[in-house]
Each structure stands twice: as structure tokens, then as C-alpha cells.
Amino acid sequence: MRSNKLVQIGSYTFLFIGMLFVLAPLYLTLTIAMKTPQETAESFFALPTRLYFGNFIEVINKANFYTFVTNSVYVTAISILLMLLLIPMVSYAISRNLNKRYYKLLYLLVLSGIFVPFQAIMLPIYRHMSNLKMLNQTGLIIMYVTLSFAQGIFLCVGFLKNVPLELDEASNIDGSGVWRTFISIIYPLMMPIIATVLILNSLWIWNDFQLPLIILNRHPDFWTLPLFIYNFKSEYASNYNLAFAGFFISMLPIIILYGFTQKHIIGGLTEGAIK
Amino acid sequence: MDYANKTGGSAQKKKSFAGNKAALIFFLLTVPTLLLYIVFFLLPLGMGAYYSMTDWDGFSLSYRFVGFKNYIDILQDNRFLHSVRFTFLYATIVVVLKLFIALVLAIFLSGKLKLRGFFRSVYFFPAVLSMITVGLIFNQIFYSVFPSIGQALGIDWLSRNILGNKSTAIYGIALTNIWHGIATPMVIFIAGLASVPKDLKEASLIDGATPLQRFFSVTIPFLIPMLTVNLVMAIKGTLTVFDYIVAMTDGGPAFATESMGFLIYKHGMAEMKFGYGTAEAIYVFVMIAIISFIQIKILNRKEAGQL
């Protein structure tokens, strides 16, 4: 009993100290964002003397902050919608026809994409999209959808292997075709894996910096949040308070979302990795 | 199994109709994916292979075909070779420390604690932030906050920005990556620890195994698949490091922190060596493909041994 208590106390101490390391950068970000330059000069670590939101207001007014949030939401939402239609569709076709050469080949071809790091195609993608006049949000969305195939199809085909063929059969006897069967029976059954695909890809797209840097950086009107915060840095390098206000405000949407859906996010990321 | 054949027996009246139509619809389901994959993935990959054999600067109207010249030049290019060394050193530091700390935290967070759920959500939180934002925040912290502590306490090495020094910058970036990247391997280890059957633990307790013995003989076998998954993800993530470099050092000081991915970007987008950059990208692609392939082979063997 006593050694158990000691273990408990030790664990709590260790975890509390670790927590300070995790939270310190966030504490600094938030407090510096709420101070004036004079206050910061006195101490980086002290709490702000009052609730001062001037830096946030300045960031929001000076930069086109709402535009960037809207852009991020738009790109993420449309990409995800397309993925959640296309990936289950093709995965269903593949999983029910794996004995045919075409489907097997398609599956292997898409899966081999896992071995290609983004940087291997970064330069040609820029060239290609520029040739197609697609250095814009549409081009970005198309790239996200295409790059999500390898992992998404791998997860969904793996899931569908455990969905019994008898379901297809029964539905076919009832007179439903392939499409009806897919939409009304298979798709609803796939919800757990679709949720995983949704979470993995939403986080990736929302936070991604490399693709927008390649495809959108020339037009400030198109910027997503990560691009905004990157370009913001050079503009406000001399004013810590404004810079940290920018960092904090660009994290705010995901912080709020995490607050409400943390169980799902943690579960989704774990599922996606282990499968 | 073939849809039409399988259902043929029970749906006699519609056999031929259902058969061909079903096959056609299945095919149509794959068409959008196939087209997107060819046009926006395979085609750029092929374009890259082609450009890598040219001397194109990225925007001139004309360029020459130079065969394997870029590939040969790269092998003698100290800047590229340095970026390879930097990237692998960086990957080693980050992967080892990250997975070790993640495992220790996972063990603590799997104990019987009242505040376990709370701790887990706090420790996981950094994983939802973007690399560029985290990189910029740590850049500011290294630039202004740490030196202010150093000056206040009179500690010399802490008074300077470690990102501003050629030999220490790599540790600043590694520290940032570790802070940010621990969460995901941690929850995967937690899932592994949760998969250890209760009766196995109890049996070893009854046998009088010490906690350390128990950990090595009972828990570790269940952690090996998780370790492999974490290794695959962490190695790929660190060998392609890009965002942190852009946010924190921009490859400097004096090219000291140029990763392979960053150098490809620099050459192709900023220094007008597009053809050369794509050739570097092909080298990186081959390196990472071989490493991932070996890892997946090992992973499959390990899993087979497990079952």
C-alpha cells in the first residue's frame, strides 16, 4: 500500500513537471500577446498587468485575418467533402474486385504513393499547376484530394475486407444495383473508418504549409492561415507582442476545436497510425 | 469476389443485365480517382524525372537536355552532401529522443491515476498545432526569451540565440520538433500498453516477477508493433523536415541547417536551378523509398512473428 502511494506521488510530480514544459511555450505566447512592448521589456514571464486585447485587434484589422480563416475553412471543407466521396467509392470498387487485374493494379499503384515523399514532386507540381493556370485554391484542393488517396484507400480497403459480402448479396437480391448498395448500405457501415480519414486529413490540410507555399504564395488574397502566419513573421519581426498575438490568434480555431473534440482527434490519429 | 458472378445464382432473372452493368458501375467508381492520380501525381512524378535531365532554370523558354549531368554534379556538391548529413543527424537526434520520451510518458500516463484523462489531453495538445506556427513561436523564444533569462542569470551560453550559431542551431530545431512531435507516438504507445492482456500481467505478478522483469518480458512484446509504426512515421517525418527550417533558420546560419527538402525548394524556387533541384528530389525520393520499403518489410515480419 505504501509503495503504491509513493508511486502515485512520484507519477504526479513527474507529470506535473512535464506539463510545465508542454504549457510554457503556450503560456508565453498568450501572455506576451496580451502585453505592451513596455511590459515585455520589464519581464517576459510576468502575467500581463491587465486584460489588454489591443495586439489582437491590431492583427485582425491590419491583416486580412477573416479572409485567411475563410480561405482555410473553404480549402479544408471542400477537400474533405471530395475525399469522403471519392475514397470510399473507389475503395468499395477495389475491395469487391481484388481478383481482377485492373483493380489489383490500381490498388498497388495508389498504395505505392506512400513511398513518395512530397518533396520529390514539389517542384514539378509547381510547374504543372502553373501550366494548367491552377496556382489557386482549386489547384490546392485538387492536390490535397489526390495526395490523400494512398493512405485513405489503404485504410478503407482494409476496413471493407471485414464487411461481409453477404450484405452486397442481400441488397442485390432486393433489386439494388451497385451504386444503391454502396450509398444505402456500405457507406453508412464505413462511418468509423470515414471518421478516421476525416480527422487525419482535416488536421493535415488545416495545418499544412508546404503545398500552400508552392501553390498560393503569390496571391495574398488566397492565403490560408499557415501562409498568413509565415508572411506575417517577416512583417512584424521587430514587434514581439504583435507577432505573438498573430501566433495565438492563428492557433485559436484549432484550440477551440480541440477543446470540444479531443477524444475523437486522439482516437482518429491513433487509429490511422495503427491500422 | 466478382460481384456479378457471385450474385448470379440468386438473381437469375437479371443475370446478364446485372453482370455487365455492375462491372461498368464498379469501373466508373474508380474513374475519378484514377484520372486525378494520373494527372496530378504520376504525371508530375514523370515530369520531375524529365526535368532532372535538363539544365532548365525554371522560367526561361528554352533549356537543354543534359542527360545525367545533374545527377553526377550533385554527388560532388558539398552543399547537397552537407544537407544529407544534416538531415540524417537531425533525424537520429529527434527520432531517438522523441520515441524515448514518448515511451516514458506513455508508461506514466497508463498508470492508475485520477487525473489521467486530464494529463493525456494536455500532453496531446501540441499535436494539433501547425509546424509553421510552432516553429515561429520557438524561433521567437530562442531569439528573445531564452537570452533574457541567460542575461538575467549571467549564464553566458544561454544569453545568445542558439539558432544563430552554426553548431548549435540543429539542437534548437530538434528541441522544437521533439516538443511538438511527442504527442502522436505517445498515444500510440498508450494504445500498445492498453493491449497487454490483464491476465498476463496478473500471472506474472503471481509468479513474483519484479516490475522491471514484468516490463521486459510481458509488456515489451506488445509494444514492438507500436515501436515499428512510430519509427516509420518519425523517420519519414524527420527526413523530410521542412517547415521548422523555414520558420526557424531559413537554412542558416551559413547554410548550416539546410535539410534535403529545404535545399530542393531553395534550388528550384529561389535560385533558378530547377532541373538541378528536381534531380536532388529524385535522389531524396530513392533514399526515402528504400528506407520506407526496408522498414515495412521488417514491420511485416515482426507482425507475423507476433501472431
Image (tube, grey):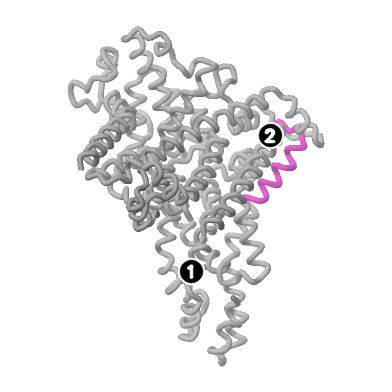
Farthest left residue in view: A50
Residue visible at 63% across and 32% down in the picture: B264
Residue A76 visible within the image: no
User: In this figure, which residue is indicated by the disc labeled 1?
Assistant: A162
Q: Are marks 2 and 1 on the same chain?
A: no
User: In this figure, which residue is indicated by the disc labeled 2?
Assistant: B280
A175 in relation to A87, above or below: below
Helix, strand or loop at mark 1: loop
Residue A219 visible within the image: yes
- Front position in the image: B196 or A130: B196
> Label 1: how many residues lie within 10 Å, few (<14), some (14-19) or many (20+)?
few
- Is residue B273 highlighted in magenta? no
**Magenta extent:** B41-59
Residue visible at 56% across and 72% down in the picture: A96
- Front position in the image: B15 or A21: A21
The quarter of the image holding the N terminus of chain B is: bottom right
Residue visible at 58% across and 30% down in the picture: B87
Instruction: Tell me where residue A62 appears, x and y as whole percent.
Output: 35, 28
Left or right: B145 as drawn, with respect to A45: right
Q: Amino acid at mark 1?
A: Asn
The dot on residue A263 is none
Q: Amino acid at mark 2?
A: Glu
Instruction: Tell me where residue A214 appears, x and y as whole percent.
Output: 56, 37
Using the rendered view, name the quadrant where residue A71 is placed.
top left
